Image (cartoon, helix red, strand yellow):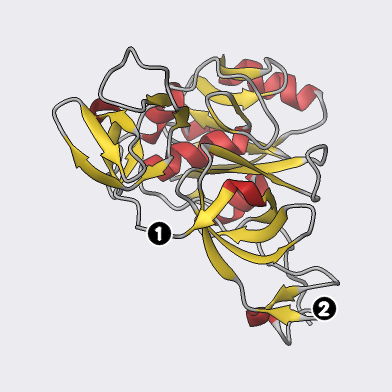
Amino acid sequence: MVALDPRTNPFRPEIAAKHLQGQVEAARFVEGTRHRVIEAIAGVRRAPSHEARLDTQALLGESVTVYETSEEGWAWGQLEADGYVGWLSANALGVAGAAPTHKVAVPRTLAFPGPDIKLPSVTALPMGAALSIARQDERFAVTAAGWHVPVVHLTPIKARQPDFVAVAEQFLSAPYLWGGKSSLGIDCSGLVQVALQAAGVPCPRDSDMQELALGTVSSLSQLRRGDLVFWKGHVAIARDPETLIHANAHHMMVAIETVANAVARIQAAGRPITTVKRI
């Protein structure tokens, strides 16, 4: 029996997805039910607890297949966009509803209860949050729930940004957060994923997955804008042959750093470059 990665395959000793029957061992196999994230940002955790490790985040409008909901209000499921498996608060999920038509194209925007920016905002929405827009005027797009979101901060759901590096640069100085995927907190692979998805490039969640799945092998001597530089447990994006942008725990934020400094500093910690990939 081939060992499957539990990060992207929904199985535990107690329960597993029906489509994995015959591939994994579990006490029972179930069909999942499709839900949609209804909070701006929902934590996806290693265990059903707010104190458990944050593995990633799901953003408003994302689809989630739920295989189990606990009595304590935790849902165990798999994100549709990148296949990640984990525990989310059941309160963060709702019925699938209408398919999203637009997504947030800036690091953060606000939703208002009416067509007036002087009103208290309803919520703050991260880049990549997906919305079903019922109507719009010159200034606001209005969701089915009545939220008014600035039109200039949205783009059609299938729109693609031309330069994913420029998207990543918009997160400069965002605080470092393990498992984070927004301008309130983001990690190295989250930055790569958010930027590539904005450009229409499917991207796995974790850096080791990205190293295996993305691009073609290149080299540091031929580094150019958009190349990904991988270390064990870390990834950075080349802005040009001399500089990188990456979310890192050294600066505790998204920072621009020279290639020479980053390579020397990380190598001194016992982690030499493992691969350079060209997207």
For disc 2, the neighbor class at 10 Å (few under 14, some 14 to 19, many from 20) is some
Residue 229 visible within the image: no
In the rendered image, is residue 98 in sight? yes
Q: Residue at x 74, y 62 (%)?
A: 6
* Percent x, y of residue 158: 28, 50
Question: Residue 108 placed where, x, y %?
Answer: 43, 25
Of residues 126 and 69, the one nearer the viewer is 69
Q: How many marks?
A: 2
* Image quarter (top left, top right, bottom left or bottom right) of the N terminus: bottom right
Q: Residue furthest bottom?
A: 22
Q: Amino acid at mark 2?
A: Ala
Q: Where on the picture, by quarter, is residue 170?
A: top left
Q: Determine contact: label 2, label 1, CB under 8 Å.
A: no
Residue with the mark numbered 2:
26
Quadrant (top left, top right, bottom left, bottom right) of the C terminus: top left
User: Nearer the N terminus, badge 2 or badge 1?
Assistant: 2
Secondary element at image label 2:
loop
Q: Position of residue 247 (x, y in %)?
A: 61, 25
**In x, y percent, where is residue 117?**
31, 16
SS type, badge 1? loop
| Amino acid type, mark 1 | Gly
Judged left or right of residue 153, residue 191 is right
**Residue sitting at 42 percent across and 31 percent down?**
224
Q: Mark 1 highlights which residue?
A: 97
- Residue at x 45%, y 48% (from the top left corner): 61
Question: Is 92 or 240 nearer to us in this picture?
Answer: 92
Is 30 left, or right, of 94 in this rendering? right
- 276 up-or-down from 183: above or below: below
Cα distance between the residues tagged 2 and 1? 31 Å
Tell me if 71 is positioned left or right of 132 in this view.
Answer: right
